[in-house]
Image (tube, grey):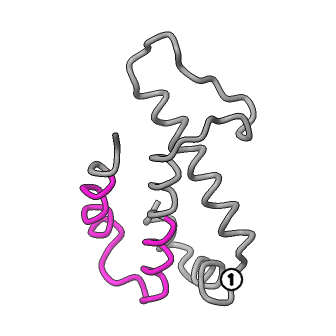
């Protein structure tokens, strides 16, 4: 994700900056929450209760997924506002332990 943000930093800086669109930020956060939720479903052991989502609006309330999506979006916004210090790999290495700690 951070490699993509770095490649398009000028766009993300405009979209996530102080003059950016709150509607777009909400859309990105929602899409990321859905992606994290679905990813968790695909990596979880199959207990017969897996959620199949045809419509993203049908995902159940997933607090950890929403938390992680919001955190990642905030980190990306802060990173581009500061001129993308360091590499995407360095940022990922810093964020990864935080994400693992936030996962149930």
Give the image quarter of residue 90.
bottom left
Residue 86: in magenta span = yes
Residue at position x 63%, y 79% in the image: 11
In magenta stretch: residue 82: yes
Q: Position of residue 58 (x, y in %)?
A: 72, 34
Instruction: Out of 92 and 102, give the one closest to the viewer.
Output: 102
Tell me which residue sits at (29%, 48%) in the image: 100
Picture residue at 34% right of the left edge, 44% below the top: 103
Residue shown at 44% from the left, 65% from the top: 3
User: Relative to residue 82, is residue 26 drawn left or right?
Assistant: right
Residue under numbered circle 1: 20
Packing grade of label 1 (10 A; few <14, some 14-19, many >=20) is some
Q: Quadrant of the C terminus?
A: top left
Magenta stretch, main secondary structure, is helix
Against 79, residue 33 (above or below) is: above
All told, the count of numbered labels is 1
Secondary element at image label 1: loop
Q: Is residue 25 left or right of residue 75?
A: right
Depicted 57 relative to depicted 93: above or below: above
Considering every residue shown, the one lying at the far top of the view is 48
* Residue 1 on image: x %, y %: 47, 59
Where residue 76 appears, x then y in whole percent?
Answer: 47, 72
Relative height, residue 42 to residue 39 (above, below): above
Image height check: is 61 above or below 88?
above
Magenta region, residue range: 73-99
Front position in the image: 56 or 9: 56
């Amino acid at each position: 994700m951070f490699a993509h943000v770095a490649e398009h930093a000028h766009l993300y800086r405009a979209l996530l900056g102080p003059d950016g669109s709150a509607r777009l930020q909400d859309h990105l956060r929602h899409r990321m929450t859905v992606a994290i939720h679905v990813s968790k479903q695909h990596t979880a052991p199959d207990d017969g209760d897996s959620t199949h989502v045809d419509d993203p609006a049908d995902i159940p309330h997933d607090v950890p997924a929403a938390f992680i999506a919001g955190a990642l979006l905030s980190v990306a916004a802060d990173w581009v506002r500061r001129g993308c210090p360091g590499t995407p790999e360095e940022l990922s290495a810093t964020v990864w332990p935080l994400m693992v700690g936030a996962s149930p």
